[in-house]
Image: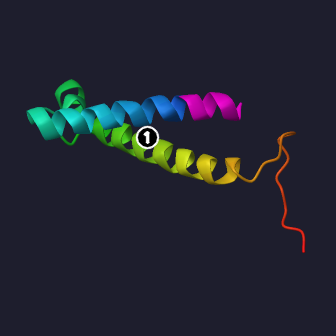
Amino acid sequence: MKNVITILALILVVVGALNWFMIGFFSFNLVEYLFGASTMVTKIVYGAVGIAGIWLILAAIFMGLKDKDGKVQTKKA
């Protein structure tokens, strides 16, 4: 299940990055074009992209703490 969430999060973050690319280079906001400026759907999309980014940050942090069996490593003194 976590793999599915991570893949969906990655897709959302890529879509968000492409949207920012278009804003920066073409002054065109695809999300606002599709859903309207400052609508509830637009806010939900932006919120979902933000949550997806946080998920991927946490996944990157904790992925480095797992051993080859997928168990979280603990520091040994």
Tag 1, which secondary structure? helix
Determine whether 44 is above or below 61 in the image: above
Residue 74 found in image quarter: bottom right
**Which coloring applies here?**
rainbow
Determine whether 66 is above or below 3 in the image: below
Given the image, on which type of amino acid does mark 1 rest? Ala
Comparing 47 with 58, the one in front is 58
- Left/right placement of residue 3 relative to residue 42 reads right
Q: Does the magenta stretch include residue 9?
A: no
Residue 35: x and y, percent?
24, 28
How many neighbours does mark 1 have within 10 angstroms: few (below 14), some (14-19), or many (20 or more)?
Answer: some
Query: From this viewpoint, which residue is outermost toward the right?
Result: 77
Q: Is residue 2 magenta?
A: yes
Comparing 60 with 36, the one in front is 60
Residue denoted by label 1: 48
Magenta residues?
1-7
Determine whether 29 is above or below 34 in the image: below
Comparing 12 with 26, the one in front is 26
Residue 31: x and y, percent?
25, 31
Residue at 18% in and 32% down: 22
Residue 60: x and y, percent?
60, 48
- Left/right placement of residue 53 relative to residue 15 reads right
Query: From this viewpoint, which residue is outermost toward the left?
Result: 27
Magenta: main secondary structure equals helix
Determine whether 35 is above or below 72 in the image: above
Query: From this viewpoint, which residue is outermost toward the top?
Result: 34
Q: In which quarter of the image is the C terminus?
A: bottom right
How many labels, in total?
Answer: 1
Residue at 43% in and 40% down: 48
Residue 64: x and y, percent?
69, 50
Residue at 43% in and 33% down: 12
Residue 16 found in image quarter: top left
